[in-house]
Image (spheres, rainbow, N blue to C red):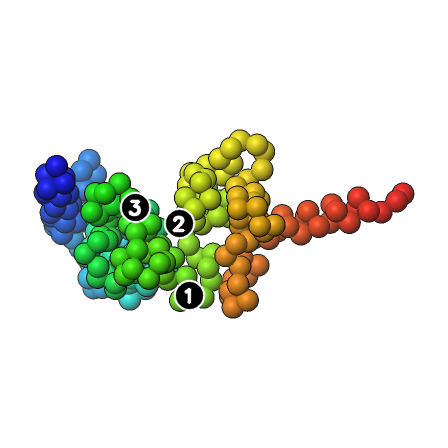
């Protein structure tokens, strides 16, 4: 069964690659030749740049809009999203999936070996650290990781807390997942990734509600 699934995935990737190379734009009414036009000569067709929010008149092949350490041109050639650091949402950044060059993880397949476990939750090098966490020590700002539901818990950590990636309040108790304390250690889940060398600017707003809570506590202790 795994062999059939693998063959199907390979076929799908080949077809997708052909579509990217020849600039097929279904329903857009744009000829393949026009779709492949590259005004700024940076190796990426205008239509692809526009579709992905890049400037087709500015050579930006070496740019890295999503900060996943995979340049825009490489994202184009591999058929992934230059504005999404983790195109397949498996918890491992696109750049890491390419640079690690491990057979157990694929840049556009969340479960490469079809074992029911996402690539980010695997431990390819057997160092007792999940693949999704292996790069945390190299990130200048740990909050750079995707957080699609904006609950201040990165997508790659939601499964650790048994919360949902696309639901900011998984248990519907009126408290966002980031303000919960799943492991009961006295630290909100959104603050679990804070480190002394974390270079985030106030962790991109995740601590704003902490300041508000502190103010409310101070107000409760003041007698009128």
Q: Residue at x 26, y 41 (%)?
A: 116
* Mark 3 crowdedness (10 Å alpha carbons): few <14, some 14-19, many ≥20: many
Which quadrant is the C terminus positioned in? top right
Question: Is label 2 in contact with label 1 (beta carbons under 8 Å)?
Answer: no
Residue furthest to the right in view is 224
In this view, 29 is above or below 210: above
Q: Residue at x 57, y 32 (%)?
A: 173
Q: Residue at x 23, y 53 (%)?
A: 105
- Counting from the top left corner in percent of width and height, residue 118 is at 30, 46
Q: Is residue 139 left or right of residue 46?
A: right
Quarter location, residue 137: bottom left
Marks 2/1: CA distance? 15 Å
Residue that mark 2 sits on: 156
Q: Along the line of sight, which residue is nearer the eye, 151 or 129?
A: 129
Q: Is residue 46 left or right of residue 22?
A: right
Q: Residue at x 46, y 59 (%)?
A: 142
Residue furthest to the top in view is 172
Q: Is residue 20 left or right of residue 96?
A: left
Marks 2/3: CA distance? 10 Å
Q: Earlier in the sequence, mark 2 or mark 1?
A: 1
Residue that mark 3 sits on: 118
Residue at disc 3, secondary structure:
loop
Residue that mark 1 sits on: 137
Q: Along the line of sight, which residue is nearer the eye, 52 or 204?
A: 204
- Counting from the top left corner in percent of width and height, residue 107 is at 24, 53
Marks 1/3: CA distance? 21 Å
């Amino acid at each position: 069964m795994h062999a059939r699934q693998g063959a199907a995935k390979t076929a799908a990737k080949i077809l997708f690659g052909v579509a990217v190379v020849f600039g097929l734009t279904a329903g857009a009414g744009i000829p393949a030749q026009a779709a492949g036009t590259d005004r700024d000569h940076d190796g990426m067709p205008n239509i692809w740049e526009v579709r992905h929010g890049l400037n087709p008149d500015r050579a930006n092949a070496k740019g890295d809009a999503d900060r996943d350490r995979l340049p825009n041109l490489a994202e184009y050639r591999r058929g992934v999203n230059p504005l999404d650091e983790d195109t397949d949402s498996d918890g491992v950044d696109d750049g890491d999936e390419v640079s690690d060059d491990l057979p157990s993880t694929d840049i556009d397949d969340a479960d490469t070996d079809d074992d029911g476990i996402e690539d980010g939750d695997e431990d390819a090098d057997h160092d007792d650290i999940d693949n999704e966490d292996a790069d945390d020590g190299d990130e200048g700002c740990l909050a750079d990781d995707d957080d699609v539901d904006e609950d201040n818990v990165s997508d790659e950590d939601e499964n650790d807390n048994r919360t949902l990636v696309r639901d900011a309040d998984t248990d519907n108790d009126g408290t966002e997942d980031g303000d919960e304390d799943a492991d009961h250690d006295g630290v909100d889940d959104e603050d679990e990734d804070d480190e002394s060398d974390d270079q985030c600017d106030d962790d991109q707003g995740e601590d704003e509600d902490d300041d508000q809570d502190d103010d409310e506590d101070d107000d409760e202790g003041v007698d009128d």
